[in-house]
Image (cartoon, helix red, strand yellow):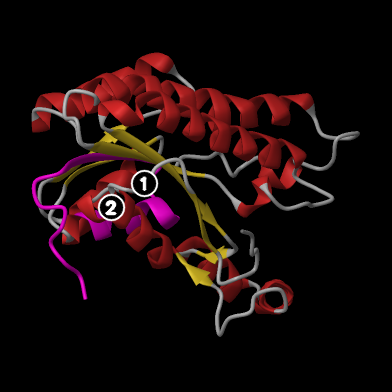
Amino acid sequence: MINSRLIGRRIIVFGSATGIGAATVARLVAEGARVCAADINFEGATKVAEAAGGETFAVHVDIADETSVTQAVNAVVERFGGLDGAHINAADLRVILQDSDALNVDLDVFDRTVAVNLRGHLLCTRAVLPHLLKNKASAIVYTSSGSAQGAEPTRPSYAMTKAGVNALMRHVASRWGREGVTANVLAPGFTVTGEMKSQMEANPEEAGKWADFFMARTPHTRLGESEDHAGVVALLLSDDGRWINGAIVDVNGGSLMRG
């Protein structure tokens, strides 16, 4: 059951045109928040904002570009009169399949991954923090990945940068927690997004292999969906999550268990 714990909250979601970000926009709006859907895919973000309804609007943002990030945040503050929360969820997944291994990865792929997953997340943090600090009860949620804690023979750039996001989150939580800004990480496991479902329908045999692979490693009845993560983000941005600070919240059906 959707509640109304975010009524009046002013939130920006970076990386909101598809997947977890799109589901998060819909969930935040359903709980009463005023939301800016920010994405490099402005058309996609606009469709998400229109579908969500409420006081939702879209802005274009390239989180690897400082001016673009600043303009996006300024647009939210100008429209809503301030900012209470941010979900920094953006990633450039176009290069992830080229992220081979430490010996063979193209350094352009590595540099692009760092530009978005590390530099971009720092730029977003720097842009939103001054506004969040004015409220004494605000929050940042970063999207990381189980890859930051697990081990894979491929995707070193992705895993390294996601581990860096975890470190950035802990820095923010420890530096500004006493000033009212909480920071936490959402660490998704394998998630079947709407885009993945379309790909699966186009290539059901290959999709079945992937689904079987991840189901064999997940002690649950199903694989993850974007909405599973959206609810957790809503919690962390609400008063229900005020006592959670500096945490990595694993949402993975049990595929990675740690204490």
What residue do we see at 61% from left, 39% from top?
Answer: 162
x then y, percent, for residue 100: 81, 43
Q: Quadrant of residue 133?
A: top left
What residue do we see at 26% from left, 19% from top?
Answer: 130
x then y, percent, for residue 42: 33, 38
Q: Which residue is mark 2?
A: 25
Can the viewer see residue 88 in this picture?
Answer: no
x then y, percent, for residue 56: 16, 46
- Left or right? Give the position of 212 relative to 239: right
Amino acid type at circle 1 is Ser
Cα separation, mark 1 vs mark 2, equals 7 Å
x then y, percent, for residue 189: 58, 61
Q: Nearer the viewer, residue 22 or 236?
A: 236
Residue 247, relative to residue 70: is it above or below?
below
What residue do we see at 14% from left, 28% from top?
Answer: 82
Task: Specify start and end residues of the magenta stretch as a single range.
Answer: 1-28
| Residue 77 colored in magenta in the image | no
Q: Quadrant of residue 19?
A: bottom left
Residue 16: mark: 1
Asked if the residues shown at circle 1 and circle 2 are in contact, with their CB atoms under 8 angstroms apart, the answer is yes
Residue 243, relative to residue 169: is it above or below?
below
